[in-house]
Image (cartoon, rainbow, N blue to C red):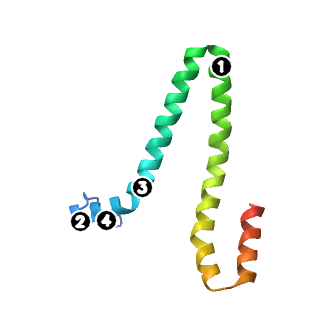
Amino acid sequence: KKKGVLPKIRLPTKKELMSLTEFTGPLLAITITRLIGFVSMQRAAMTLGVKQTAAYQLCINLIIFFLLFGEPLSQLSQTQLPALIDAENGNQVRSNLKSVLAL
């Protein structure tokens, strides 16, 4: 006998999809642009030879590694700092910056 604990999965309505796209559209564009750039660079590196492609792969791995840590910190700063600066709470701004830099 099913208990009905899990929510029903359904397709979003057009209105819900449009409101979601309004928020995620710019993020999707940025992600696709990055992906196209990385693929183009890889294709160019592949024409240069094996060593150059390996060097490219190493560099890309480092970039992605630091992007994984840098992007959340950037988003944290962008969401919290404006409200703190508008409230003119200097101590809280410094505390937030210290915690971001400590991460």
- In the rendered structure, the answer to whether residue 15 lies left or right of residue 31 reads left
Q: Looking at the picture, how far across and down is residue 16, in whole percent?
A: 27, 65
Tell me the CA gap for discs 2 and 1: 48 Å
Structural crowding at the residue carrying mark 4, measured as other residues with C-alpha within 10 Å and reported as few (<14), some (14–19) or many (≥20): few
Residue 73 location in percent, x, y? 64, 60
Marks 1 & 4, CB-CB < 8 Å contact? no
Q: CA distance from mark 1 to mark 4?
A: 44 Å
Q: Tell me which numbered mark, 1 or 3, is placed earlier along the sequence.
A: 3
Q: Nearer the viewer, residue 51 or 11?
A: 51
| Residue type at the position of mark 1 | Gln
Quarter of the figure with residue 88: bottom right
Q: Position of residue 98 (x, y in %)?
A: 77, 69
Left or right, residue 72 beside residue 97: left
The residue that mark 3 highlights is 26
Q: CA distance from mark 4 to mark 3?
A: 13 Å
In the picture of the structure, the residue carrying the numbered disc 4 is 19
Q: Amino acid at mark 2?
A: Lys
Specify the label residue 52 is tagged with: 1
Dot in front, 4 or 3: 3
Query: Dot 2 lies on which element?
Result: helix
Label 1: few (<14), some (14–19) or many (≥20) C-alpha neighbours in 10 Å: some
Residue 38 vertical position relative to residue 52 in the rendered view, above or below: below
Which mark is first along the chain, 4 or 1? 4
Pair 2/1: label in front: 1
Amino acid type of disc 3? Pro
Q: Earlier in the sequence, mark 4 or mark 3?
A: 4
The quadrant in which the N terminus is found is bottom left
Image quadrant where residue 71 sits: bottom right
